[in-house]
Image: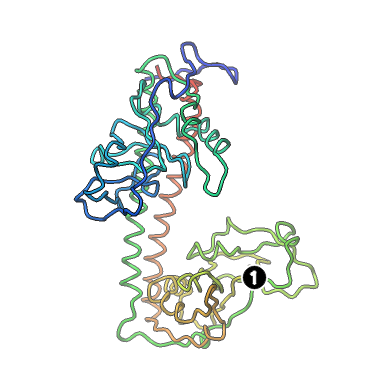
Amino acid sequence: MVAKEQSLQSDALPQGWYKTELHKIADVLSGKRLPKGKSLINQNNGYPYIRVADMANGSVDLTNIKYVPQEIIPSIRKYIILYSDIYISVAGTLGLIGTIPKSLDGANLTENANRITNIDCDRDYLKFYLQSNAIQGVVNSEMTLGAQPKLALTRIRNFEIILPPTLEEQKAIARVLSDTDALIQSLEKLIEKKKRIKEGMMQELLRPKEGWVEYKIGSIGTTYGGLSGKTKADFGEGSSQYITFLNVINNPTIDPNLFERVEIRWNENQNVVQQNDLLFNTSSETPEEVGLCSVLLSKHSELYLNSFCFGFRLNSQKINQLYLAYFFRSYYGREHMKALAQGATRYNLSKSLFNKLVIQIPDLKIQNKIAQALIDTDTDIRNYMSQMNKITKVKNGLMQQLLTGKIRLI
């Protein structure tokens, strides 16, 4: 089909399109809370129960579905959701919109979600319209206030919906957006597959083996601190850049696109981060997240480190910096760091204890091969994520154009 451009004023609709309210084209019904004192079970000898935790925009995650015990099924059995319905989350994470797979047809629905049923238009068109900015903006602005924000049933029923005049046109729009969703989902699966492959590679390649050499950390490099003596007013300003805390903990290699600004005065004595330096976070709420490592592979002038991290500069030609960054993110590196973490409610990493740490490292040639294999996998993951982000932007643009009739498909 050839798209036809539609000349519109900002508040105009194409000929034949019309506005209505959700309750005029569908029924909106509540889910059901479990009886007091009753809990869900893992075994599937009851009916599946869909929680907000299982929901995403589009469909539900089948990974951790729970089940209603047999003895309480009669009391909540009528609060179900069908394959032909649409769900909307109304508590917790608000405004998640999607449909369920056929395997969950007739599952029980949590009280923290509503189901939209008896739909008098194309179901998938309505699903996408409910995901659009027009409705999500209402969700964000009209939710009731309280300890736990909640979206009222009456407000959902009064959502304003724009519809093309024919079922054929509704289906055509839904098909285009569904095809785009399928592309996004295929990339999501590729990303998850690559991440699992990487985890397996790290588990095997970084496991200490016979013949590997022991090194005391303090003997192969020196530590230095991050920014000191800075105030809130110094950040976001100035001609200098610094590496943020999140850039260190989220990435095995520092992302230069995420540097932020900081004011460094001429008389300050601050440590400058150099190419190939290793960077570690010194503090976290859990011992599992202390001492996550990242390496700066690119070269920059006048680059600094946030005050919640410290740097480590190697002085040995026998060590590959990238290999070490991956090692300290592996199971084996994390076990070392957890053992060094000190604290009760918040955990800290002492540089002096870090320097006393002894680790086993293979020959440099093996380090290089391992580091290259892992960074190649990370590059694949980043490329897939970049593709997915681009397609997601395309989909958002299509929704804005197709769901308002600015572009017509028939």
Disc 1 residue type (three-letter) = Ser
Q: Is residue 398 visible?
A: no
From this viewpoint, which residue is outermost toward the right?
Answer: 267
In percent of width and height, residue 128 lies at 42, 31
Q: How is the image coloured?
A: rainbow
**340 or 104: nearer the viewer:** 104
From this viewpoint, which residue is outermost toward the top?
Answer: 15
User: What residue lies at 37% left-to-right and 71% top-to-bottom?
Assistant: 369
Task: State whether residue 235 is above or below residue 403.
Answer: below
Q: Secondary structure at mark 1?
A: loop
Label 1, on which residue? 307
**Disc count in the image?**
1
User: What residue lies at 65% left-to-right and 66% top-to-bottom?
Assistant: 303
User: What residue lies at 32% left-to-right and 61% top-to-bottom?
Assistant: 197
Task: State whether residue 18 is above or below residue 310.
Answer: above
In percent of width and height, residue 71 lies at 22, 49
- Hey, which quadrant is residue 195 in on the image? bottom left
User: For mark 1, does the 10 Å Cα neighbourhood hold few (<14), some (14 to 19), or many (20 or more) residues?
Assistant: some
Task: State whether residue 366 is above or below residue 25.
Answer: below
Q: Quadrant of the N terminus?
A: top left
**150 or 100: nearer the viewer:** 150
In percent of width and height, residue 281 lies at 55, 71
**115 or 315: nearer the viewer:** 115
Q: Quadrant of the C terminus?
A: top left
Q: Is residue 28 visible?
A: yes
In percent of width and height, residue 368 lies at 40, 73
